[in-house]
Image (cartoon, rainbow, N blue to C red):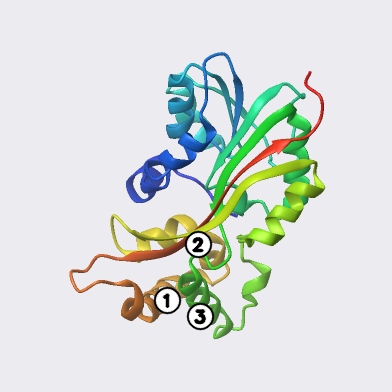
Amino acid sequence: MTRWNPEVYARNARFVSELGTPLLELLAPVPGERILDLGCGDGALTLKIAAAGATVVGADASHEQLRAARKLGLDVVRMDGHAFAVGRHFDAVFSNAALHWMKRPAEVVSGVAAALKGGGRFVGEMGGNGNVAAIRRALHSALRARGVDPEAVDPWYYPGVEEYGALLAAAGFEVETIGLIARPTPLPGDIVSWLEVFAQPFIEAVAPPERSSYLQEVRSTLAPALRRPDGTWIADYVRLRFRAIRRGAGF
C-alpha cells in the first residue's frame, strides 16, 4: 500500500504537477464548466483548473493529500477511482499521473463515462508502456533475488496506445488524440528519495532489516544508466496522454 505524505511528495515529486501544463492546455477549461479532477493529490493542478473559472471537484483516495487540497480552499471528495460515487453531470474529467495506480482500468474508464454528460471529455496523462522500465526491472530483480514475487506487489499499470484506446472505445468514447511521450525527467534529489515515495509496495515486501540494503542494491543497479556525471538522477518516464469524447446525447 502506498501512503502519501503531502510534504514529502511536494519536496520529491512536485515536478509531476509542474509538468502538467500541456495536459491542462489539452483540457482547455472554460468558465462555467463542471470538471472532476480524478486523483487530484494535493490539488496543485486542481487549483489551476479552478483559476480558469471552472467549477472543479477534486477526488482522491488519500486522506492526507485531500487534507492538503482542502487547505487550498478546494472542493474535494474521497473516492476510489474504481468505484465512482458521482452522478452524470460533469463536462470533463481530468486526470494527471493517477490512472496508472488504478489496476482495474475497465472499471475506471466505465466510471468516468458514467460521470460525464454526453459530449463530455476525458483528458488524462498517465504512465504508459515502457514507463520507468529500468527502475521497474531493478526493483523486480532485487525482489526476486530475495525470494519475493514482484508481480504480486507491483502497484503500476502502464498500457500502450492500442490497449488504452480500446478500453476508451469500449466504454463509449471517441478518441480524439492518444499517444506515448518519452520524457526522461531530472529528479530533485537522489533516486532513493523517489523510490521511497513511489515504490513503497516493493520496499514493504522486504523484511524491515533488509530494506536499506534492498534500496542500495536498486540504486547501484540504476546508477550507470540513470545518474549523470554531475550526480543528477533521471527517471525514465514514458507518458500516455489522451483526450476522448463521450458519445451520446447531452443532458
Q: Secondary structure at mark 2?
A: loop
Kindly identify the amino acid type of the residue bearing the numbered disc 1: Val
Question: Within 10 Å of the Cα at label 2, are there few (<14), some (14-19), or many (20+) other Cα atoms?
Answer: many
- Residue 53, given in percent of the width and then of the height, sits at 48, 16
The single residue placed furthest to the front in the displayed view is 176
**Crowd band around label 1 with a 10 angstrom C-alpha radius: few (<14), some (14–19), many (20+):** many
Q: Position of residue 174 (x, y in %)?
A: 73, 42
Residue 129 shown left or right of residue 222 in the figure: right
Residue lying at the far bottom in this picture: please name it.
145
Residue type, label 2: Ala
Query: Residue at the location (40% across, 71% down)?
Result: 212
Left or right? Give the position of 101 relative to 114: left
> Considering the numbered disc 3 on the image, is that residue within a helix, a strand or a loop?
helix
157 versus 90 height, above or below = below
Give the position of the C terminus as an image quadrant.
Answer: top right
Q: In terms of secondary structure, where does tag 1 sit?
A: helix
Q: Residue furthest left?
A: 230
> What residue is shown with label 3?
142
Res. 246 in view: yes
Query: Mark 1 touching mark 3, by CB under 8 A?
Result: yes
Judging by the rendered image, the residue that carries numbered circle 1 is: 218
Q: Is residue 104 visible?
A: no
Q: Are marks 2 and 1 in contact (CB under 8 Å)?
A: no
Label located before the other in sequence (2 or 1): 2
Q: Which residue is mark 2?
A: 199
Q: Position of residue 110 (x, y in %)?
A: 78, 42
In three-dimensional space, the C-alpha distance between marks 2 and 1, rounded to whole angstroms, equals: 11 Å
The residue sitting at 77% across, 24% down in the picture is 87
Picture quarter with the N terminus: bottom right
Residue 56 to residue 170: above or below = above
